[in-house]
């Protein structure tokens, strides 16, 4: 009989448990597809006694994931613990040093140490696969690395944090403020242990940096991602945007420009009738643009037991079938650091501010915009009372530099009562 592929799984939380279930329930299907059996030989997790709703009978137990990674009866180390440092990093390095292939769902680990780990693995002719690290069940890594390998990629965009998309769509649907919906998301268990990873855009930024590396053939560079979270978004902005035909999304955009690689993860307005604008709840969407293929839109569950386990299994099957793809789609040793470019491609902007309601206030704002070279597309004064005039302006396309000049100019007019809100309108 063909030799089985032997897995050591570290981490038996939601995803690890899902992987064990599929391997137990679908052994024959997987064996047929791989041309060889895929078996678990050993597992490791924090608590041995915990009831996970699935039998671990027949698997060796290791308290220490590093020991698991080094076992002679493990061919593939499956890292499902999470975290960029500590046990996840130690055990992954130990696995590579011990001559194992690695499958991981860990975006933070790869966003921060992916280049070094990939070089280490590839030097020893081993592979690291990470389909589950980006957009859960959506096969975006394989789409970029394999399906679109014949394309020059011009832009990668995506909503890749389901928790943020849940919070934003729930705020809009229920008319609730951010803090209340954040508390709801917390109660539902949607938030990462450190919620700032979600709402601060860090988790989605990790994912974007991984896609950028594959798409543009560069070293993964998370530090170069311009990050802005959703914490400051108000129901006022969500409603106003909706009334103007837009929805606000935490959107990642990466594109190679003449000035270098732009990578940003920030709240953006997108047309409500676009695929991204129609994305509801915890769902993810990734948009890939290639010169030959045009635009590809991938949509699906970005988290959860089944979808993430599905992605992990796709990597395991790839290895079992004998496929040996470089971590980032081309040999890591040859990847170069891209010159990071501030994301400054001209765009329309949504501006909201409260003006002191006195004669000439609006004229002063319009003058600052004009002097900054910014043309107004639309302008609206909302819910006006005797002393304050809330104003919304949509600009024509302008550069970020001009916008920054205008924002500083507003402060000097003496008629703007609070920090203006400025949100980019993305062409999608
Ligand atoms: N916290 C992540 C999300 C989980 O909300 O999308 C998957 O990375």
Image: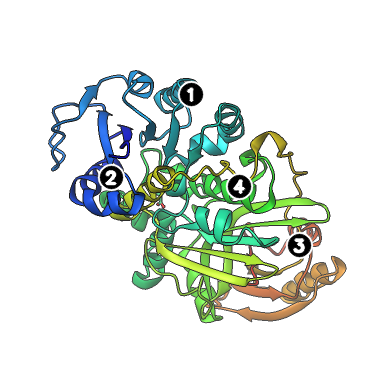
| Disc on the earlier residue, 1 or 4 | 1
| Disc on the earlier residue, 4 or 3 | 4
Q: Which residue is mark 4?
A: 329
Q: Which residue is mark 3?
A: 345
* Front of the two marks 4 and 3: 4
**Residue 388 location, x and y as percent?**
59, 70
Quarter of image, res 255 = bottom right
* Secondary structure category for the residue under label 3: loop
Residue drawn at x 56%, y 78% as measured from the top left: 382
Of 138 and 146, nearer the camera is: 146
Q: CA distance from mark 4 to mark 2?
A: 25 Å
Residue 320 left/right relative to 28: right
Q: CA distance from mark 4 to mark 3?
A: 27 Å
Q: Residues within 10 Å of mark 3 (few under 14, many from 20)?
A: few
Q: Quadrant of the N terminus?
A: top left
Mark 2 within 8 Å of ligand 1, using the beta carbon: no
Q: CA distance from mark 1 to mark 2?
A: 22 Å
| Disc on the earlier residue, 1 or 2 | 2
Q: Is residue 77 above or below residue 278?
A: above
* Secondary structure category for the residue under label 2: helix
Which label was assigned to residue 19?
A: 2
Residue 154 left/right relative to 1: right
Which label was assigned to residue 93?
A: 1
Q: CA distance from mark 3 to mark 1?
A: 39 Å
């Amino acid at each position: 009989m063909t030799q089985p592929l032997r897995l050591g799984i570290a981490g038996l939380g939601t995803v690890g448990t899902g992987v064990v279930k599929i391997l137990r329930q679908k052994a024959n299907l997987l064996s047929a597809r791989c041309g060889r059996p895929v078996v678990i030989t050993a597992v490791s997790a924090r608590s041995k006694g915990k009831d996970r709703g699935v039998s671990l009978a027949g698997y060796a137990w290791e308290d220490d994931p590093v020991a698991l990674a080094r076992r002679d009866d493990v061919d593939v180390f499956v890292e499902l613990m999470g975290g960029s440092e500590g046990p996840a990093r130690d055990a992954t390095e130990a696995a590579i040093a011990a001559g194992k292939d690695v499958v991981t769902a860990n975006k933070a680990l790869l966003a921060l140490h992916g280049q070094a780990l990939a070089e280490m693995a590839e030097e020893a002719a081993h592979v690291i696969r990470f389909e589950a690290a980006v957009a859960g069940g959506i096969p975006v890594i394989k789409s970029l690395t394999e399906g679109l390998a014949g394309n020059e990629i011009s832009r990668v965009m995506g909503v890749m944090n389901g928790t943020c998309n849940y919070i934003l769509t729930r705020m809009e649907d229920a008319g609730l403020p951010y803090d209340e919906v954040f508390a709801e998301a917390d109660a539902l268990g949607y938030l990462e242990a450190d919620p700032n990873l979600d709402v601060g855009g860090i988790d989605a930024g990790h994912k974007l940096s991984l896609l950028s590396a594959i798409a543009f053939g560069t070293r993964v560079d998370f530090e170069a991602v311009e990050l802005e979270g959703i914490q400051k978004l108000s129901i006022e902005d969500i409603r106003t945007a909706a009334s103007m035909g837009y929805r606000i999304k935490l959107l990642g955009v990466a594109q190679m420009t003449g000035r270098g690689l732009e990578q940003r993860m920030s709240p953006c307005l997108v047309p409500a009738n676009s695929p991204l604008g129609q994305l509801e709840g915890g769902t993810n969407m990734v948009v890939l643009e290639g010169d030959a293929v045009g635009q590809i839109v991938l949509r699906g569950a970005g988290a959860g037991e089944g979808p993430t386990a599905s992605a992990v299994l796709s990597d395991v099957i790839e290895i079992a079938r004998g496929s040996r793809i470089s971590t980032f789609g081309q040999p890591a040793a040859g990847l170069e650091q891209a010159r990071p470019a501030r994301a400054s491609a001209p765009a329309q902007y949504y501006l909201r501010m409260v003006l002191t309601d006195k004669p000439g206030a609006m004229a002063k704002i319009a003058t600052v915009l004009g002097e900054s070279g910014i043309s107004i597309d639309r302008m609206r004064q909302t819910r006006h009372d005797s002393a304050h005039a809330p104003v919304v302006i949509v600009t024509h396309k302008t550069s970020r530099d001009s916008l920054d000049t205008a924002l500083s100019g507003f402060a000097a007019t003496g008629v703007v009562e609070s920090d203006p809100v400025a949100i980019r309108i993305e062409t999608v």
